[in-house]
Image: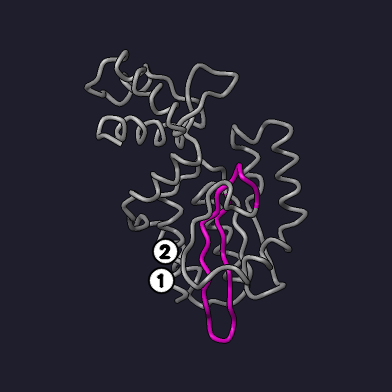
Amino acid sequence: MDKRKELILNTIIKEHIKSGAPVGSSILVEKYKLDISPATVRNEMMALEDDGYIMQPHTSAGRIPTEKAYSMFLENLKIKKLAAQESEDISNILKSRDESDLKDAAKAVANISGTAVFWAFHRHNLFYTGISNLLKQPEFREFNLIYDISAIIDHIDEVVDKLFDQCEFGRHVLVGSVNPFGNFCSTVLVKYKLGDNIGLVGILGPIRMDYEKNIAIADFIKEKLG
């Protein structure tokens, strides 16, 4: 992909992550001050759509990134550190590392990330929080997706059990079709060992989640519990 297409695609992804709305060429040029004409942006967007990186929802003239786009975005993402105040908040909670603290940490992560969080302290001992954060997302206001989220809650124990077996220790990012919670979601996972216990924490959100922030959170937790 040439630099101009890459710039336009990354800008579409960043704007869609922020707004949750389809992105049009005029927004890209005006809001992000791109030194490209609207006509050129439209042509490049057509090419990106032909290549499967963006798609047009039936209800809008704008475009949204596809799973293929997010996968490429993640391959080139520069990992950043968590903001100082957020890292301090989580660090203070994790000092004793007992189960009640891990639950409080899960709530803090849900609040910071604006997503749902599950935390399995060891196998068959699961806590989750922040489901309401998912229901607030614009893409989850459609009836069929609300139904899918209900199905996630009903089967979360089974999915987490499978993840215990499938995941290696460390951090993982599961996007769309490779995400066991549904192809409309993404999950950032950390599997860790704390004393004699193996734990698994996951940040679960829409496929347009803020990967930069959520990966930073996951890496910070991995560092603290590793």
The image quarter containing residue 163 is bottom right
Instruction: Assign the N terminus to one quadrant of the image.
Output: top left
Q: Nearer the viewer, residue 192 or 131?
A: 192
Magenta stretch in the rendered image: 181-204
Q: How would you rate the neighbour count of disc 1 (Cα within 10 Å): few for under 14, some for 14-19, many for 20 or more? A: few
Measuring 55% from the left and 55% from the top, which residue is drawn there?
203
Q: Is residue 199 above or below residue 2?
A: below
Residue 47 x, y percent position in the rendering = 38, 25
Farthest-out residue, bottom: 196
Residue 56 x, y percent position in the rendering = 52, 23
Decide if residue 174 is on the left or right side of residue 78. right
From mark 2 to mark 1, how far is it between C-alphas?
6 Å
Q: Amino acid at mark 2?
A: Asp
Q: Which residue is mark 1?
A: 223
Measuring 50% from the left and 16% from the top, which residue is drawn there?
61
- What is the chief secondary structure element of the magenta stretch? strand
Residue 101 x, y percent position in the rendering = 57, 71
Decide if residue 115 is on the left or right side of residue 65. right
Residue 226 x, y percent position in the rendering = 45, 76
Measuring 50% from the left and 50% from the top, which residue is drawn there?
113
Which label is found at residue 211?
A: none
Q: Amino acid at mark 1?
A: Glu
Q: How many marks?
A: 2
Decide if residue 42 is on the left or right side of residue 156. left
183 magenta-colored: yes
Q: Nearer the viewer, residue 96 or 2?
A: 2
36 magenta-colored: no
**Cβ–Cβ below 8 Å for labels 2 and 1?**
yes
Farthest-out residue, front: 50
Q: How would you rate the neighbour count of disc 2 (Cα within 10 Å): few for under 14, some for 14-19, many for 20 or more? A: many
Q: Which residue is mark 2?
A: 219
